[in-house]
Amino acid sequence: MGKCIVCQKYAGPFYSLHKACYRVYEDTRECLRQVLSSAVDTSVQADGLTESLNDCRPTLSFSLRPFESLVRCAWHDQAKQIVKRKVVNAEHANYILSVAPALEIEDKDVGSNLFVRLANIEHLARINQNQPISKRFTEMEDRIKLSDDETLIWVFEGAIKLERHKRAEGKHWSVFQSLLNNFKKSRYKELSALAGAAGDLAISNQNLYYVTKNETAIISFLAIYSITPVKDGVRIQSAQGDAMPDTYITGDGRFTYALLRYAQEQKFAE
Ligand SMILES: [Zn+2]
């Protein structure tokens, strides 16, 4: 506390920005936003981009760390806009992903599955135009033994299947069950999500597979009644099991939903 991040002079006991320097700070933020936004439109090379972003730093007395964090905020805002746009633009998504290393932005720093969602956009754009997906998943092809007329379309790695009201089993029950009983339904969902183990959700033109270390569950498209997009995943109602819907969290609800519809169309177009 005390030193102003813009001019480095004392700013008072509880302040790190002078009132007058706040304007400079805001102008810097706006400059970064504009530079990045036009770079996305014109696909400027990463070197040129970092140079132009650095030109937004008003003086060298503007502390480096706050400046770098403004750069990361600008990247984050652009990336979020790109994943939220109704009309997907694969070039924009690939561009913003491609400059992340130069700006020292990593997947773990940004959260909300932003990297995954950006990377999926080019494939989402393809299926929206009814073009086949070019990506191959050979490792999974070997694991799930497809039938002759079956092709694997996509694999969501590390997808979480939300556990439904599971009977308490074995030694975990006392603590876990009594905890669950004390929580309201919404809280239960969160807890269940944490309790759900991750597996891989594989989608072919015939079936949906949920593959975990111990087992592979198969749901035929013929047995699916409905698919609903939910935040970060999909809910699937099928005639199998106890007829309760299953929720799969893949990190990208929009893409998962679109992909399943596309896969089903492949099946019923046959
Ligand atoms: Zn100042």
Image (spheres, helix red, strand yellow):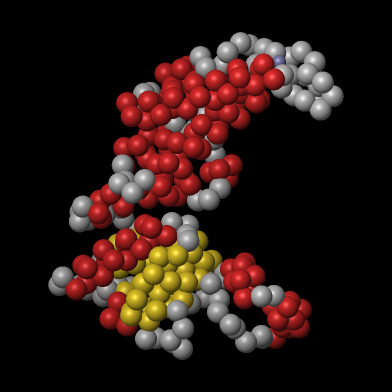
Identity of the residue furthest to the left in this view: 270
Q: Residue at x 66, y 86 (%)?
A: 169
Identity of the residue furthest to the right in this view: 13
Instruction: Find ligand 1 in the image and state its quadrant.
Output: top right
Percent x, y of residue 205: 26, 69
Instruction: Tell me if residue 130 comes above or below residue 214 in the rendering.
Output: above
Instruction: Tell me if residue 20 comes above or below residue 143 in the rendering.
Output: above
Q: Quadrant of the N terminus?
A: top right
Percent x, y of residue 139: 38, 61
Q: In which quarter of the image is the C terminus?
A: bottom left
Q: Which of 161 and 13 is in front in this view?
A: 13
Residue 211 visible in the snapshot: no
Percent x, y of residue 189: 59, 71
Residue 74 visible in the snapshot: yes
Q: Which of 200 and 62 is in front in this view?
A: 62
Q: Which of 20 and 186 is in front in this view?
A: 20
Q: Residue at x 47, y 60 (%)?
A: 232
Q: Residue at x 51, y 71 (%)?
A: 161
Q: Which residue is drawn at 46% across and 17% down?
A: 52
Instruction: Tell me if residue 156 comes above or below residue 227 in the rendering.
Output: above
Q: Is residue 15 left or right of residue 153?
A: right
Dividing the picture into quadrants, the one containing residue 181 is: bottom right
Number of labels in the image equals 0
Percent x, y of residue 180: 69, 78
Q: In this view, does 157 lie to the left or right of 10?
A: left
